[in-house]
Amino acid sequence: MEIRNRIIKRLLSYFIRGLVLVAPLYITALIIWSGVEFLDNIIPINIPISNNQVVYLPGLGVLIILGSIILLGFFFSTVVPQSFFRLTEGILRRIPLVSLIYYSIKDLLLAFVGDKKKFNQPVLVTMYRDTGIKKIGFITQPDLKQLQLIDHVAVYMPFSYALSGELYIVPIANVRPIDASSTDIMKMLVSGGVSMQARSEETAESPIESN
C-alpha cells in the first residue's frame, strides 16, 4: 500500500510539472495562432495551384497588413505635411460620435506605444486609511486642473485576468510611487499577484509628495 501511494504521488507530481510546462505553451500558441487567423481573415490569401485547388499560406495576410502599416507610417511621416493631419483631426473633432470613437482609440494606442506613454508610472494608492487597504495602479493624468480638482491625480487600476480596469480620482496625499518596472507591476496586476518578477519598494520621497 505504501509503495502504491508513493507511485501515485510521484505520477501526480510528474503530471503537475508537465501541466505547468505544457499549459502555458499551449495557451500562448493558441492565442498567437488565433490572432494570426483573425488578421489573415481580413486579407485572405489563397494561391491557386490548379483549377480546383488552392493553397492557404497562414501568416501571409499578417505580413501584408504589417507591411502596409509600415509603408503608411513612412509615407505620412515623410511626405504628407503635419498640417494635413491637423486639418483632418479638426474635421473629425466636429463629428460627435466619430470624434468620441477616434480619439478614444488614438489616446489608448498612444498610452501604450506613443512618445508620451501613460502606463509607465506605477503607484500605490491608499484606498481606506482606517484599514490601510491599498491598491496598485498607474497614473494617467498628473494634473486635473481642467476638472477644477487641485492636488488630485487620475489613477487607472487594471483588473486581474482581464483587459479592463477602473479609473479613480484620488488625492495626491494618498498616492506613493512604486520603485519597480511598470512591466513587472502590470504582470503582477494581470496575474492577480501571482507573477512578480521583482519585489517593489515604495520610495521614501517622490515628486508627487513634494508637490
Image (cartoon, rainbow, N blue to C red):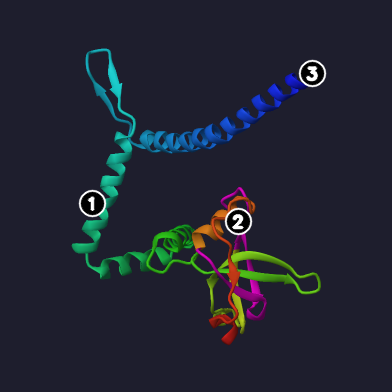
Amino acid marked by disc 3: Met
Mark 1 — residue?
71
Amino acid on which the number 1 mark rests in the picture: Leu
Farthest right residue in view: 130
Verify CB contact (< 8 Å) between mark 3 and mark 1: no
Report the Cα–Cα distance between label 3 and label 1: 69 Å
Earlier residue among tags 2 and 1: 1
Label 1 crowd (10 A; few <14 / some 14-19 / many >=20): few
Q: Residue at x 44, y 66 (%)?
A: 117
**Residue at (56, 79) in percent of width and height:** 144
Q: Residue at the far bottom: name it.
A: 211
Q: Nearer the viewer, mark 2 or mark 3?
A: 3
Q: Position of residue 157 (x, y in %)?
A: 61, 62
Identified at 31% across, 43% down, the residue is 65
Q: Is residue 211 visible?
A: no
Cα separation, mark 2 vs mark 1, equals 36 Å
Mark 3 or 1 closer to N-term? 3
Residue holding disc 3: 1
Label 3: element kind: loop
Residue 161 lies within the magenta run: yes
Q: Earlier in the sequence, mark 2 or mark 3?
A: 3
Q: Which residues are magenta?
A: 157-181
Q: Are marks 2 and 1 in contact (CB under 8 Å)?
A: no
| Label 2 to label 3: alpha-carbon separation | 45 Å
Picture quarter with the N terminus = top right
Queried whether the magenta region covers residue 170, the answer comes back as yes
Density class for disc 3 (Cα within 10 Å; few <14, some 14-19, many ≥20) is few
Question: Residue 80: x, y in percent?
Answer: 21, 63
Residue 7, position in %: x, y? 69, 22
Q: In the rendered image, which residue does mark 2 sit on?
A: 189
